[in-house]
Amino acid sequence: MVHCMDDGTTALAQAIGARVRHERTERRWTLDQLAEAAGLSRRMVINVEQGAVNPSVGTLLRLSDALGVGLPALVEPPQQRPVKVVRAGEGAALWSGAHGGRGVLVAGTQPPDVVELWDWELQPGERHESDAHTAGTRELLQVHTGRIVVTVGEEVVSLGAGDALTFAGDLSHSYAHDAGGPARFSLAVFEPGVGVTRPAEPATHADPTTHAATGEED
């Protein structure tokens, strides 16, 4: 899928691309090796590294898991200070809905035990589907305004303002909002042991000449 990108989205896509390329070259992986480890097409890896696409959250998770760095590391430069402040409006908007909803990664920790803090807003009729994350991932969610429906595996839960939910993120899950005004909720994701048990290194491949990016999603 091709996503239209405004200036802010383009800048974020370029920053993500630079970080993915840096992490790949640090490991001396070819484009084919990263594509194989992440389960993505070579074209998608090229497009992400060139900042030519607005990659989905699922694509970013595959890349961060393959590189063993955690999702927050892909959207911000390396950080060694003990304190980092993210001002209002500075979070990375990694998901946008058809009607104006957004999923913003506002803070995150470094490996090996990665914690992500998200600010989500869903407009009526919007739904975000998420594949199962790595084994042991857990999520905490609290609704601030409106109502949402969370599906985890086969279980469906309706939540209103003030309600909270703890669930296994290593099952497929989704968040949906059907009616009324916008719904807003906070989401914390805990992914333990990122980069500790690294995927087996892909077999070495020749790295053919990079072809032009097409801007297509996988």
Image (cartoon, rainbow, N blue to C red):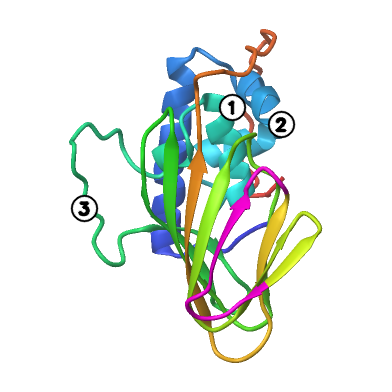
Q: CA distance from mark 1 to mark 3?
A: 28 Å
**Which secondary structure lies at badge 1?**
helix
Percent x, y of residue 199? 62, 18
The mark nearer the N terminus, 3 or 2, is 2
**Which secondary structure lies at badge 2?**
loop
The mark nearer the N terminus, 2 or 1, is 2
Residue identified by numbered label 3 = 85
Which circle marks residue 39 in the picture?
2
Q: Is residue 159 magenta?
A: yes
Q: Crowding at label 3, few (<14), some or many (≥20) Cα neighbours within 10 Å?
A: few
Which of 57 and 169 lies nearest the eye of the viewer? 169
Q: CA distance from mark 3 to mark 2?
A: 34 Å
- Whether residue 209 appears in this view of the structure is no
Horizontally, residue 172 falls left or right of residue 86, namely: right
**Which secondary structure lies at badge 3?**
loop
Which circle marks residue 179 in the picture?
none
CB of mark 2 within 8 Å of CB of mark 1? yes
The mark nearer the N terminus, 1 or 3, is 1
Percent x, y of residue 141? 52, 62
Residue identified by numbered label 1 = 66
Question: Which residues lie in the magenta part?
Answer: 158-171
Q: Residue at x 53, y 34 (%)?
A: 64
Q: Is residue 25 magenta?
A: no
Percent x, y of residue 216? 68, 49
Percent x, y of residue 195? 50, 23
